Image (spheres, rainbow, N blue to C red):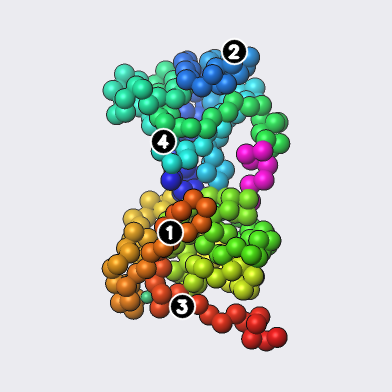
């Protein structure tokens, strides 16, 4: 699943090519979008900007109209110079936004909505999102506060809850927990607010480095069965959580600590 950094980079690329340009061609296979387009008419509008909020990609058109897409597992946006052959079959096409120079094509994107800008903030998909991990003015304290509101789940699962903090996916969940030395399966209730804020900050730092184009060398993600780069212990992997995503961790560097709270009682 693409994480916030991937969506952020896709939005940046689309923004550079499309912002300020007029839509000369608009196509969609979604009947809901087509119906909305009958009403709003995307063609002829100016693309004002493209940005990301958590894992949602938002394309803003003149006249207060927004196209929201979510990639889920397999969706992807491609950008082509006009007349270039697509690298995906036409049957995978879900949306096309064309300008005189470019074609932005969404392949296999499962979620798309054309909505008035004023209604976007009230839409269920966006309204409950936590602070955006990649936003300039990110509030780690608020994110930690929101995570602390689900004390009964473990920290690995809590980091993926987009209503607590928007944009973190499985890869950076694993890497941030390793960088913080936290056992992924510790309940949120057993962590201090500082511990939570620290792991969130680690995720942000790693994801911003990825956005900046730094090549990522993963410490634990995808390294199950191989030695920890720090201590040599075999990296463990475990499927857990509702979406059965694999968590990777070093059982030694991320050993469970006796909860500070329990000790002081
Ligand atoms: Zn280790």
Marks 3/4 in contact by CB < 8 Å: the verdict is no
Where does label 4 land, which residue?
76
- Crowding at label 4, few (<14), some or many (≥20) Cα neighbours within 10 Å? many
Give the Cα distance between marks 3 and 2.
57 Å
Q: Which residue is mark 3?
A: 255
Q: Secondary structure at mark 4?
A: strand
Q: Is residue 76 above or below residue 170?
A: above
- Residues rendered magenta in the picture: 124-130
Q: Earlier in the sequence, mark 1 or mark 4?
A: 4
List x then y, in percent, for residue 68. Answer: 56, 32
Between residues 48 and 216, which one lies in front from this camera angle?
216
Work out whether mark 1 precedes mark 3 in sequence or the reverse, and give the earlier one.
Answer: 1
- Which is in the foreground here, disc 2 or disc 1? 1
Q: Residue furthest bottom?
A: 264
The secondary element bearing badge 3 is classed as: loop
> Quick one: label 4 or label 2, which is nearer the N terminus?
2
Per the image, is 128 magenta?
yes
Mark 3 or 4, closer to the camera: 3
Q: Are marks 2 and 1 in contact (CB under 8 Å)?
A: no
Please name the residue that numbered disc 2 is placed on: 38
| Residue at (47% x, 64% y) in the render | 176
Q: Using a 10 Å C-alpha cutoff, classify the residue at mark 3 as few (fewer than 14 neighbours), some (14 to 19) or many (20 or more).
A: some
């Amino acid at each position: 699943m693409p994480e916030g950094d991937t969506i952020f980079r896709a939005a940046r690329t689309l923004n550079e090519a499309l912002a300020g340009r007029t839509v000369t061609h608009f196509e969609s296979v979604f009947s809901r979008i087509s119906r909305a387009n009958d009403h709003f008419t995307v063609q002829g509008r100016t693309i004002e900007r493209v940005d990301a909020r958590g894992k949602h990609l938002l394309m803003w058109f003149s006249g207060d109209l927004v196209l929201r897409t979510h990639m889920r597992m397999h969706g992807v946006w491609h950008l082509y110079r006009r007349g270039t052959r697509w690298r995906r079959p036409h049957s995978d096409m879900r949306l096309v936004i064309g300008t005189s120079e470019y074609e932005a094509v969404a392949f296999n994107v499962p979620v798309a909505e054309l909505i008035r800008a004023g209604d976007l903030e009230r839409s269920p998909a966006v309204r409950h999102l936590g602070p955006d991990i990649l936003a300039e003015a990110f509030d780690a304290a608020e994110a930690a506060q929101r995570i602390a509101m689900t004390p009964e789940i473990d920290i690995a699962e809590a980091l993926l809850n987009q209503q607590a903090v928007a944009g973190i996916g499985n890869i950076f969940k694993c890497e941030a927990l390793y960088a913080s030395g936290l056992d992924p399966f510790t309940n949120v209730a057993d962590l201090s607010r500082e511990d939570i804020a620290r792991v969130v900050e680690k995720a942000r730092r790693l994801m911003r480095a990825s956005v900046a184009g730094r090549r990522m060398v993963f410490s634990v993600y995808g390294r199950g069965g191989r030695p920890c780069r720090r201590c040599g212990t075999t990296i463990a992997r475990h499927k857990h959580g509702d979406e059965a995503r694999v968590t990777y961790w070093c059982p030694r560097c991320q050993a469970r600590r006796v909860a500070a709270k329990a000790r002081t009682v």
